[in-house]
Amino acid sequence: MMNTSGEASKRLEQALATTREATNIIDNLIAEHEYQDVASLVAQAAAKLLEAASALMQSNDEAGLGALESADDLLDAVYDIIDGETDED
């Protein structure tokens, strides 16, 4: 394997596809899981981070920064849920 930006982009795209598949599974579990909503948001944020890395490796800074902002929004939603649940205790 050659350590090139093209190879990195290829691996990031593979990771993104796998992450999206995992998110779909999380969102469609046969039996609901206590942390399913949080896990889904974290997986969605991971996908956005992978999108950002891929875009940046392709010198597409606008798309990369947009994906980073989306990931940040998703992680904010995670912390809102966590904070809401800890406030209830």
Image (spheres, grey):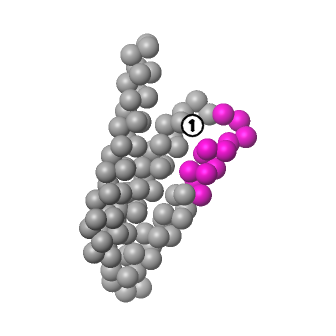
**78 left or right of 23 in image:** left
Q: Position of residue 25 (x, y in %)?
A: 63, 50
The answer to whether residue 3 shows anywhere in this view is no
| Residue 34, quarter of the rendered image | top right
Q: In which quadrant of the rendered image does the N terminus lie?
A: bottom left
Q: Amino acid at mark 1?
A: Gln
**39 left or right of 84 in image:** right
**23 left or right of 74 in image:** right
The answer to whether residue 69 shows anywhere in this view is yes
Q: Which residues are magenta?
A: 21-32
Q: Can residue 22 be found in the magenta stretch?
A: yes
Q: Is residue 3 above or below residue 32?
A: below
Q: Can residue 58 be found in the magenta stretch?
A: no
Residue drawn 67% across and 44% down?
A: 28
Task: Determine crowd level at label 1: few under 14, some 14-19, many 20+ residues with C-alpha closer than 10 A.
Answer: some
Q: Is residue 71 above or below residue 3?
A: above
